[in-house]
Amino acid sequence: MKKALGVICLLLLVSSASAYIELYLKEGGVNNYIFDPSARNYLPYFDGCPSAEIPPGVLIEDQPMTRTFFVWGRFVNELGTKIIGIQPAVDVVANPHGLNITMGQNVIYRHRKLNGSTSQRWTRWDGTNNLGINSPAAAVTANGIVDNDNSPNPNWDLVCPYGTEGEVEFLLGAFQLVSSRGKVLGDLTLGLARLGLAANDGMQSYYPEVRVAGQVVQEFWYVQGQPLPGVPVTHPAPVYLSWIPEPASLLLLSLGLLLRRR
């Protein structure tokens, strides 16, 4: 009996350890009203989830850039979880080669759900106007982003089913990056700000583990029967994309620095 209980406890620990929410970027999301901050039914403009995830890495852009990115997330082994609050941290910072990127238009979508009975309709995020991508978004009436594919209408909450057991990936918002001149230089960081990401499992609120590019940006906190602490334990947002000069330019730059030193 003790052996059986030990196995069950081990399975619960393994399950808990493998549960997290992952944030990432795509170039797909909605086709119109991309930077519209109003509460709107975006479903007619939602392109689903066909676009590929943008992998973290290094990019080379030789010409000025105006580019739109969509912030997505996915639940991993978090079936039934509801995100009730989130404050992203999306920023552009200088890297060793410089910075000529600025943040343009940006928004967290306040999707308005119109199907179902009156009691089943809601606005995400409730009671808040003009949310920028780094704003704190709170589900005032507890209607957040739910890990449930809502079959047979999985897209009513700007979500798409993936994997197994009703897990979903979800659209959070969008932002635009603009470079002013010449080659694109700088780093894009993606993570969570001080307020982090709060969730509820149907029993109580807690802080799930959150990852970006394989790094933990928020630590897991769940103490049964205890109220949610004011803020979670978060870590600095990692670099998601880095724009650098082409290798030939890097070689010339190194040569120039060497001659200057001489």
Image (cartoon, rainbow, N blue to C red):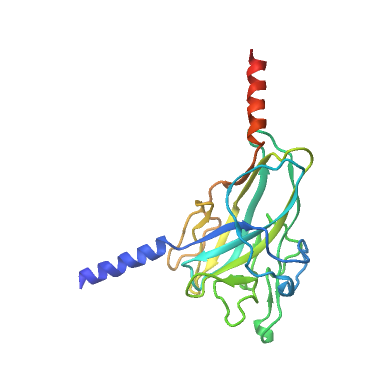
Q: Measured along the vertical axis of the image, is residue 153 above or below residue 45?
A: below
* Residue at the (44%, 68%) spot, across then down: 225
Q: Measured along the vertical axis of the image, is residue 95 above or below residue 172?
A: above
Quarter occupied by the N terminus: bottom left
Quarter occupied by the C terminus: top right
**Residue at the outermost front position:** 248
Relative image position of residue 41 (x, y in whole percent):
74, 74
Q: Measured along the vertical axis of the image, is residue 27 above or below residue 188?
A: below
Relative image position of residue 97 (x, y in whole percent):
66, 33
* Residue at the (53%, 70%) spot, across then down: 162
Q: Left of 236 or right of it: where is 6?
A: left
Relative image position of residue 16 (x, y in whole percent):
41, 64
Give the quadrant of residue 63: top right
**Residue at the outermost top position:** 262
Relative image position of residue 198 (x, y in whole percent):
56, 62
Give the quadrant of residue 153: bottom right
* Residue at the (56%, 46%) spot, across then down: 236
**Residue at the outermost bottom position:** 117
Q: Please count the marks in the image.
A: 0
| Of 44 and 92, the residue lying toward us | 44
| Of 102 and 233, the residue lying toward us | 102
